[in-house]
Amino acid sequence: MAENEPKAEQQPLTASQRAFKDASGEIKDLVKRVLQEERKVIHMKKRSEIHATILEHVKRAIQ
């Protein structure tokens, strides 16, 4: 099957997926960076530490 052909049983997008799809490039980039950071440390840190890292990404993006 070619990459651009629709899948036979394609699931509808979730609300989060729709919001990401409709977001601007800047927002998509921010979300991707935050998720990459979280994946690197999710097994090593407490949730509060992960949230602090996410907050720092957001602060940098809006300054």
Image (cartoon, rainbow, N blue to C red):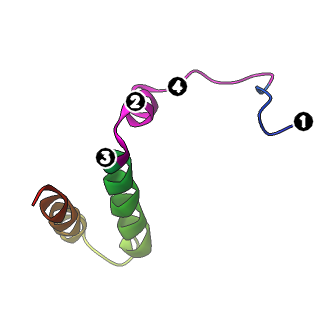
Where residue 17 sits, quadrant-wise, is top left
| Alpha-carbon span between mark 3 and mark 4 | 18 Å
**Residue picked out by circle 4:** 13
Q: Earlier in the sequence, mark 3 or mark 1?
A: 1
Q: Which residue is mark 3?
A: 27
| Residue type for callout 2 | Asp
Residue 31 in the image: state x and y as whole percent.
Answer: 35, 52
Marks 2 and 3, the one that precedes in the sequence: 2
Marks 2 and 1, how far apart at CA: 27 Å
State how far apart marks 4 and 2 are (Cα): 12 Å
Label 2 sits on residue: 22
Residue at image position (90%, 36%) is 1
Q: Which residues are magenta?
A: 8-25
Q: Which mark is residue 1?
A: 1
Q: Is residue 9 one of those drawn in magenta? A: yes
Q: What's the residue type where badge 3 is placed?
A: Ile
For the point 52% across and 25% down, the residue is 13
Mark 1 crowdedness (10 Å alpha carbons): few <14, some 14-19, many ≥20: few
Q: Earlier in the sequence, mark 1 or mark 4?
A: 1
Q: Which amino acid is tagged 4?
A: Leu
Does 32 sit left or right of 11 as displayed?
Answer: left
Q: Quadrant of residue 15?
A: top left
